[in-house]
Amino acid sequence: MDFGLTEAQNSIVDAVQGVVGNFDDGYWLKKDREGGFPEAFYAAMAEGGWLGIAVPEAYGGAGLGVTEAALMMMTVAGSGGAMTAASSIHMNIFGPKSIAVYGSESQKSRWLPEIVKGTYKMCFGVTEPDAGLDTTRIATKAQRDGDDYVVHGQKIWTSTAQVAEKIMLLARTAPRNAANPTAGLSLFYADLDRDAASIREIDKMGRKAVDSNEVFFDGMRIPVEDRIGEEGKGFRYLLDSLVPERILLAAEAIGIGKDALRRAARYAGERVVFRRPIGQNQSIQHPLAVNWAELEAALLSTLKAAWLYDKGRPCGVEANAAKYLAAEAGFNACKQSVSTHGGMGYAREFHVERLMREVMIPYLAPVSQQMALNFIAEHALDLPKSY
Ligand SMILES: Cc1cc2nc3c(=O)[nH]c(=O)nc-3n(C[C@H](O)[C@H](O)[C@H](O)COP(=O)(O)OP(=O)(O)OC[C@H]3O[C@@H](n4cnc5c(N)ncnc54)[C@H](O)[C@@H]3O)c2cc1C
């Protein structure tokens, strides 16, 4: 593969391909049918050192940028494993950013090497049922009690909580102040203590093997030394993870779209109806060509956002634009791939219906398409904030 990248970046793509290539369509189809965390895949990525791609070298990582991480995640998601593969390692890739930037020296040396090795799985507890996309309305409280915080409240959609030992948690440590609604939120990286947190899996459309959950906290204690940075500044710290998260999700949507398109083009070349390959018909060719162009454009937009991030430059607008374009391009490619396969597009053995179900995740999360557009309208076009 060559995207006009450096030699080193292309060799990352090839090396990741070498790992993900060991997990074939049959492996992912079985995961889709039966569930069960893809432990073998997770272990292979950990063993190859890929979980630490963006963690500083001093803590056992490769110290590379979001650009390299995005290329890796595009390759992972494009391997046939789609979001099941990507989400199984996602938190290890973007989660440590807040720790690496805002954690104390002791927190970094305590946590980062474990995240790189994949010793602990981590989940991400931000979304709440009554707050939705308005994160400043979250109501889960972490109340100081001596050397601990005590957590009460509820999260929803917390992915991998069934298997995770650790949680990165955003909670209120001070009441919401309308004049400064992002203040008073604190960020923790803590043990997910199942004695004080009950976890209920959500039955969902796809990605069966990577669970998503409701998590109910009833007095979960977190030692003060597990708070990242200063109390009340957690939202600011989280932003350092959220921008790369959008970029990575964009890359994943593109990976899935490219996979779907590859399968569609292959099928269109092989399937003969009316004594010619269906791919000879322009009504089959042109939509696939449009998918190709859209995916390439989304990739360029994603690489630009990643490049800006890695240069330390502002890139909120670019990251939202990349996630928006990639989600649209990925979804369009999957839908067209199902359509190109005709009736067989609906058959599980051709995999594209699974890709279509999974590509809905970057469409909906971590931020919706509408909220990405709200951000662009406000920050690129200077229009009044609409929410
Ligand atoms: C498979 C999956 C895995 C997830 N994993 C995690 C996880 O690990 N950790 C975590 O914290 N969260 C996770 N999430 C949650 C995800 O980030 C949220 O679902 C997402 O942010 C949307 O929030 P919501 O569902 O509450 O939507 P809501 O806020 O209820 O919004 C519903 C709809 O209304 C629209 N809308 C709302 N307000 C406006 C407005 N002002 N202008 C225009 N449109 C608006 C939205 O765009 C959306 O289309 C996951 C979600 C999914 C589906």
Image: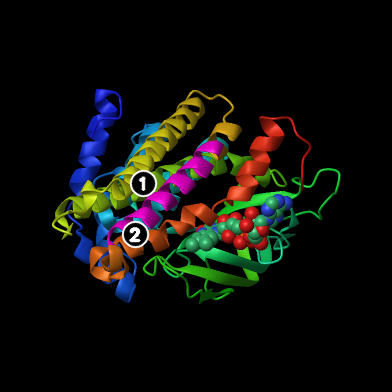
Residue 253 coordinates in the image, percent (x, y): 41, 48
**Residue 73 vertical position relative to residue 334 in the rendered view, above or below:** above
Q: CA distance from mark 2 to mark 1?
A: 10 Å
Residue 263 coordinates in the image, percent (x, y): 24, 53
Q: Residues within 10 Å of mark 1 (few under 14, many from 20)?
A: some
Nearer to the camera, 263 or 203:
263
Q: Considering the numbered disc 1 on the image, is that residue within a helix, a strand or a loop?
A: helix
Instruction: Identify the amino acid type marked 1.
Output: Pro
Name the image quarter holding residue 80: bottom left
Q: Extreme front residue here?
A: 274
The dot on residue 339 is 2
The colour scheme of the drawn protein is: rainbow
Instruction: Identify the amino acid type marked 2.
Output: Ser
* Upstream in sequence: badge 2 or badge 1: 1
Do the residues under discs 2 and 1 have CB atoms within 8 angstroms?
A: yes
Q: Which residue is mark 1?
A: 287
Asked whether the viewer can see residue 145, the reply is: no
Q: Considering the numbered disc 2 on the image, is that residue within a helix, a strand or a loop?
A: helix
